[in-house]
Amino acid sequence: MTALPLHPLAEPLATDADPDATGGRRIGVLLSHGFTGQPASMKPWAEALAAQGYAVEVPRLPGHGTTWQELNTKRWSDWYAELRAAHRRLAARTDVVVAAGLSMGGALVLRLAADEPSIAGVVVVNPAVSTKRLDVKLLPVLKHVVPSFPGIANDIKKPGVEEHGYTRTPLKAVHSMMQAWGPLVADLPKVRVPVLYLRSTVDHVVDDSSEPLITSGVSGEVRVVRLPESYHVATLDHDLDTIVEESAAFARRVAGIEGSA
């Protein structure tokens, strides 16, 4: 089977740690993009962390960065398998790993932390594990009749910034994602490590139903930081510097670096 052309910004990213810059420990940060997005949405964050000495791993989740039609053939199990493979690659070259994710990526890294006790901490940006939308109840039927809905990409406040996500939302794939939410929420108490929860004040994609489920569901301590100048794709928006600063300090703290805030 011929591989589909890959968007030029969708290549995965991996860098090695510089322990001299991070208190003598090789700290890795695994960063997962969201549904219908691609690595481009995480690379500015990842590159900023790499410049500070952190090892980073930004996988491309299956079906992303090609066509929405291909994404419609992929499921939660495919995305999670790739995230776990990326974690293994990063863990092999670091002393400690922090898992970070945007939107669906946030749900994926919470799932990883629930399943993998070696994760030292979790950073989520506008994560989704729930929705108030009533039309999702029709997805089991609609997905067999309508292949896609209009896309959710580019919810960004900063002018002239492009997420490079799909213009359509494939329904079979989105239904698979939503089917994974219930089991994940039930397992959130298994997340016993610290969680940094970064939340945009205005988000036109993920509503406010996920935040209380996550912040009250996990067993680890939770720090919530508001992002007042960003929409859903905050990793490409005005508050990127805050995300970088907060996540770098968080990674140092959970890695046990002396002098961390």
Image (tube, helix red, strand yellow):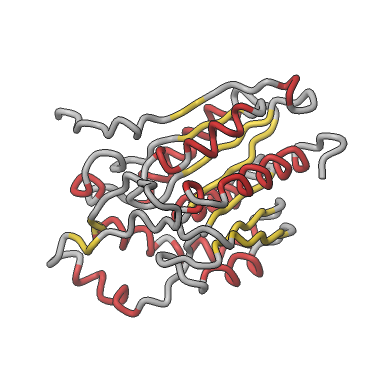
Q: Is residue 191 left or right of residue 72?
A: right
Q: Quadrant of the N terminus?
A: top left
Residue 252 position by quadrant: top right
The image position of residue 107, as x and y in percent, is: 50, 55
36 lies left or right of 201: left
Residue 119 location, x and y as percent? 65, 42
Residue positioned 54% across, 65% down in the render:
185
**Residue drawn 38% across the image and 64% down it:** 179
Point out residue 219 in the picture as x, y percentages from the top left corner. Answer: 70, 61
Vertical comparison of 64 with 169: above or below: above
Instruction: Residue at the far front: name it.
Output: 159
Image vertical order of residue 187 relative to residue 86, above or below: below
The foreground one among 167 and 170 is 167
Count of numbered badges drawn on the protein: 0
Does 253 sit above or below residue 96? below
Q: Nearer the viewer, residue 224 or 178?
A: 224
Q: How far across and how far down the image is residue 14, in percent?
A: 50, 26
Q: Residue 250 occupies which quadrant of the picture?
A: top right
Residue that extends furthest to the left in the rendered view of this protein: 145
Q: Residue at x 72, y 22 (%)?
A: 19
Frontmost residue, 144 versus 52? 52
Q: Residue furthest bottom?
A: 134
Quadrant (top left/top right/bottom left/bottom right) for the C terminus: top right
Kindly identify the residue that appears in the image at 56 percent across and 29 percent down. 90
Side of 55 relative to 237 (left or right): right
